[in-house]
Image: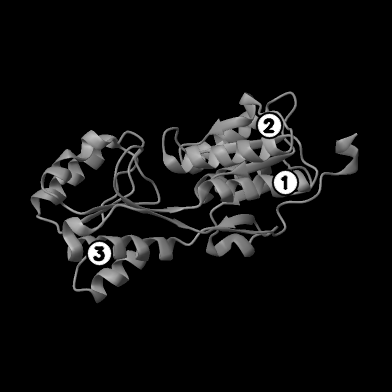
Amino acid sequence: RGAEDLASDSGYSLIVCNSDEQRDKEAQYVEFLVRRRIDGLLLSPTSGCSVDCLESLYKRRIPLVFVDRSIRDAKAFSVLADNTRGAQSAVKHLINLGHRDIGVVLGIPGTTTSDERLHGYELALRKHDLSIKKEYVQWGAYRVQGGADAARALLALEQRPTAIFCSNNTMTVGVMTELRRQGLGIPEDISLVSFDDVEWSELITPPLTAVMQHPLEMGRQAMQLLLDQLTLGQKARPKTIRVPVRLAVRGSSAALRKQEEQ
């Protein structure tokens, strides 16, 4: 919406294509858009996307801005959330509440969002001299069912976590569904923090503690970078903008009960 509003104000129309995390579908859409002689492209790349995949864009010098995700080693414009700091603040919050066994549910390996949020999770643990347990790191493919499956794996551990940090709101729905299916209370039995705040976060019981992103602003800034390239051409220099995030503490996270600490 942020991208579309600015594009419309500047005399451009926005064509939206959803790759469904499929590399082949993404490549087909890129080629389709290139044939339609687009003026520029905003891209949130799949995990399989690489610099080579975008050769047709580079050959035609079509302006490109990565939004939400980027590709390593690509000298390009990008607008990203402050993923590492946001994840670190979420896990630090749980540690300050007394939690030492903290599970994490991530999206897809290789995506910058997952990799950076995992890095933030690990940084928070290391800074508090807590070990990083491989079994506490689960992957949910950014899907509701993936979140439920990841939660089930964490709950099946002999020493299950007392808190879960879920790295996006779609998987958080799956995690919450599985916790309630197993009769576990939030936060009485397990504290839960999500990366991504949504409209319903404060409407559910308990309200969800979440890292608040600003997707509208990210879209607007990404479109502005695209417009800058269209105006300045080769004079525009690649840069990365990190949009700040903020932790909103609500009812889904609570201090570890004393009997659990003993």
Question: Mark 2 highlights which residue?
Answer: 155
- Residue 1 visible, this orientation: no
Q: Secondary structure at mark 3?
A: helix
Whether 145 is drawn above or below 214: the answer is above
Residue 132: x percent and y percent? 66, 29
Q: Secondary structure at mark 1?
A: helix
Which tag is nearer the camera, tag 3 or tag 1? 3
- The answer for how far apart the CA atoms under marks 1 and 2 are is 18 Å
Instruction: Count residues near mark 3 (Cα–Cα under 10 Å), then give few for <14, some for 14-19, many for 20+.
Output: some
Residue 90: x percent and y percent? 64, 49
- The answer for how far apart the CA atoms under marks 3 and 1 are is 41 Å
Between discs 1 and 2, the one toward the N terminus: 1
Which tag is nearer the camera, tag 1 or tag 2? 1
Residue 153: x percent and y percent? 62, 29
Which residue occupies 53% across, 54% down? Answer: 196
64 and 151: which is toward the camera: 64
Residue type, label 1: Leu
Residue type, label 3: Asp
Q: Which quadrant, please, contains the C terminus?
A: top right
Which residue occupies 59% across, 46% down? Answer: 87
Between discs 2 and 3, the one toward the N terminus: 2
133 and 32: which is toward the camera: 133
Question: Mark 3 highlights which residue?
Answer: 228
Q: Quadrant of residue 201?
A: bottom right
Question: Mark 1 highlights which residue?
Answer: 94
129 relative to 86 in the view: left or right = right
Whether 105 is drawn above or below 173: the answer is above
Residue 97: x percent and y percent? 78, 48
